[in-house]
Amino acid sequence: MAKLDALIDELVTANRILAREGVVDSFGHVSARHPDNPRRYLLSRSRAPDCIENDDIMEFALDGTPIDARGRGPYLERYIHGALYEARSDVMSVVHNHSESVIPYGVTGKAIKPIFHMGASIGHEVPIWDQHTKFGDTDLLVRTMAQGHDLAKKLGKGATCLMRGHGCVVVGPYLRRTVYTAIYLELNAKLQMQAEAMSKKVRFLTKGEVSKVTETTSPANVNRAWENWCRAVDRPYRD
Amino acid sequence: MAKLDALIDELVTANRILAREGVVDSFGHVSARHPDNPRRYLLSRSRAPDCIENDDIMEFALDGTPIDARGRGPYLERYIHGALYEARSDVMSVVHNHSESVIPYGVTGKAIKPIFHMGASIGHEVPIWDQHTKFGDTDLLVRTMAQGHDLAKKLGKGATCLMRGHGCVVVGPYLRRTVYTAIYLELNAKLQMQAEAMSKKVRFLTKGEVSKVTETTSPANVNRAWENWCRAVDRPYRD
Amino acid sequence: MAKLDALIDELVTANRILAREGVVDSFGHVSARHPDNPRRYLLSRSRAPDCIENDDIMEFALDGTPIDARGRGPYLERYIHGALYEARSDVMSVVHNHSESVIPYGVTGKAIKPIFHMGASIGHEVPIWDQHTKFGDTDLLVRTMAQGHDLAKKLGKGATCLMRGHGCVVVGPYLRRTVYTAIYLELNAKLQMQAEAMSKKVRFLTKGEVSKVTETTSPANVNRAWENWCRAVDRPYRD
Amino acid sequence: MAKLDALIDELVTANRILAREGVVDSFGHVSARHPDNPRRYLLSRSRAPDCIENDDIMEFALDGTPIDARGRGPYLERYIHGALYEARSDVMSVVHNHSESVIPYGVTGKAIKPIFHMGASIGHEVPIWDQHTKFGDTDLLVRTMAQGHDLAKKLGKGATCLMRGHGCVVVGPYLRRTVYTAIYLELNAKLQMQAEAMSKKVRFLTKGEVSKVTETTSPANVNRAWENWCRAVDRPYRD
């Protein structure tokens, strides 16, 4: 399979996985930077993740302009993706979602921190971006590149950023790793909420532990999960 | 398909979706105003939502009198629907349910408020109606038009109203939007409960944000979810 | 179908339903009084509820002696059933289970009370029986008629009784109603736990409301749920 | 079927069961001591539990050296298994997992204690091992025999041990019993968390009760659950 076709196929799989794992529901999306052109990215037309087929995957310029739309309507919030690819050349994939456990953290201002080794990939800290600070009353959607740039600034060099009253973004060095981080961000938030309800003295991972886990999480680790997720959504697994 | 037949078909789909999404269990119901006669509405015979077929959909006058019952037994609580259609000419669809997270709000008197953009469609506030206030000890079911009118008064011009010790009602300008609101009312309540357990300083959506989200939630947004829900319950999706 | 065969068939269905609704897992059981002989009851051999077939249903004397065992091994805890049928001539069916939300109430001594109309069938109050009080350190199983009689005394004239550190029993005037009560006891406990975590001022159903709901809950209401549950476990529904 | 082949088959079943019951996700593993050679154990190659087939089961020396690897890559954390088999001649099976409810206990230092009779198999107490105490900042994985020995020391003579910021280990006298304990450790932790949120006066099982339940939990009890779990994962059940 050609490199581009393989990535499109994997992007469809990623959508189905995120839906099954409860990271996205009818809303939320995942993209990948174009393998041959770093100024472009691949993202579905406006459709629920679990319904997406290969033909739904569109190509966009970083400013959100569709390349060869062929009548397909894009997501209003595609600017999230373009702005993050523009700001971070190391980022090859972006997830935007509203998974359940990240919402309470975003609206209380409490910090999500890695609580177990599977959560280390979220990074040392998870900043919270509030669209209201700079843009006032909006419908909370990221509808412009200016809003996307502001979000990118808050994300900084990290892997994850909450969006107050909305959801979060997750970025990564390759598609599977980004999906992996998005799934464990949700789980880390869920378990942290329980631990913090039990005790004020929660022991989080040390900075050194977070760094070591992040360094040693290899594509082989991620692939162990990827095979499992592919099986669950009945999609072929490729090494 | 004729307009009426299409709506009946969609109403069956709505029942199945609400069951799968956990908004109704064996109880709860959804209706639509008759497309040709605003003094009538469509509602299933007394049956669990997940079991309903097209032939179960009955037609009722606003006072709850069945039109051509053909031996089908109606829900005891159909007066909820008639009373709300009577009070609100803008309402084209009504859901009544006992979804899990709305119950605790109804019995504690705590207010549900939009906590994330998906929750904005519940409206600026969710009043709580207590049947006991006016009707004393009852079996809590809305068994008369008088009880329905009292509920309609508490609902006012809003989209949602809790019923203490019982459940809630959700109304909307079209069937799919009403189902959408009912699903996200439940999710908003669930996430709000978690956020309020974490902190006393929960930042809800501003009034301006709620208004903007409500204005910009288009049938296209709702349809993105509708397609996804149809797929999950194995019913055909129509634009 | 003969009356006995029909009841055996329904008892198998009841087991499957309780498993699917999360009231029992691999453990827990449901029985029915024999339709022709009030001194006997029907209960599966020792097997997980979701695996039970018609041939697994055994007949027992009230003291727990199997009638025509044909090599089938009975549950060690069958004395729960016999003792309750003996003590209560109005009881035609018994469920014993360890569903999740009843455990925390049993071990904290907090009282479960009806919080919404679906929960009213659990009765005005749910007593807590502690096997330790009379029998000291045991393996907590009800292994003798003496233990069963002590449990029956605590249950009194009610429909439900918690067993500290173990689970609960539910009794009813017919099989479907008992299953119905067991399912909503679990849900009531779950929702009550959430409400009590939110506020110290939880408004429960009044005594009058509980009585009215109990009086008006007819076999037709229960059958609406029964049809739905049969569908979910792929068993035929009979009126 | 030869004894070894039967055990390999059962080990595959155990993996599938642990996945379905939510004890493992894409990570976590279960092993059995070799039936003919107590200095060896059986454990899958590095693969997600729900994907494992009979050919994935490898044989290891206690120090973690694969016997006849045939290109199959082992789990990095296999030292957990070898170290526990070495330290405890009574242990015939080991589970390592990160199930949801054990994580909050591990990071708060709160003790898990048996709260209901199904939880008694976790033992009188569940110690917490912190890899950081002796080994400082690591990626939290048990990558050496030295780490495994330290964990074995903390486990002592018990059946369960939490690993702070990581998960837990469960050991047992035979494979099915170990799986049983792992499943009920997770459930006990979940229910205990709820009970402790409700009240400061939680009544746990007495030491005498824990001992009695442990003594009377027979293979027949465990098999009742095993048959049920086999059915759920569509694997043949053998007595």
Image (spheres, coloured by chain):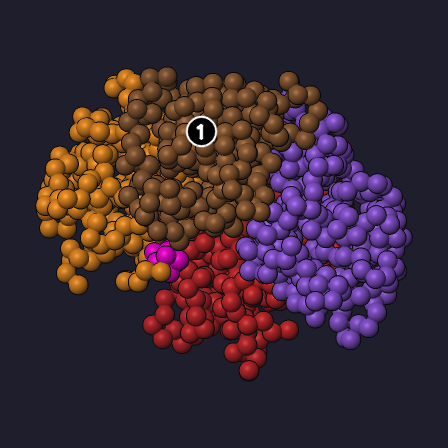
Chain colours: A red, B orange, C brown, D purple
Q: Amino acid at mark 1?
A: Arg
Q: Nearer the viewer, residue D146 or C166?
A: C166
- Residue C152 image point, x, y percent: 51, 22
Q: Residue at x 12, y 37 (%)?
A: B65
On the rendered structure, is C200 left or right of A216? Answer: left
The stretch of residues the image draws in magenta is: B225-233
Would residue D156 be seen by someone viewing this image from the given angle? yes
A158 over C25 or under it: above or below: below
Residue D58 drawn in magenta: no
Report the side of A125 relative to B179 (left or right): right
Does D105 appear above or below B12?
A: above
Using the image as rendered, state which of residue C52 and residue A59 is in the foreground: C52
Query: How far across and down, in percent of the image, does residue C208 sit?
Result: 33, 17
- From the image, tell me which residue sits under label 1: C39
Count of residue discs: 1
Q: Horizontal and vertical percent for residue C182? A: 45, 34
Q: Quadrant of the C terminus of chain D?
A: bottom right
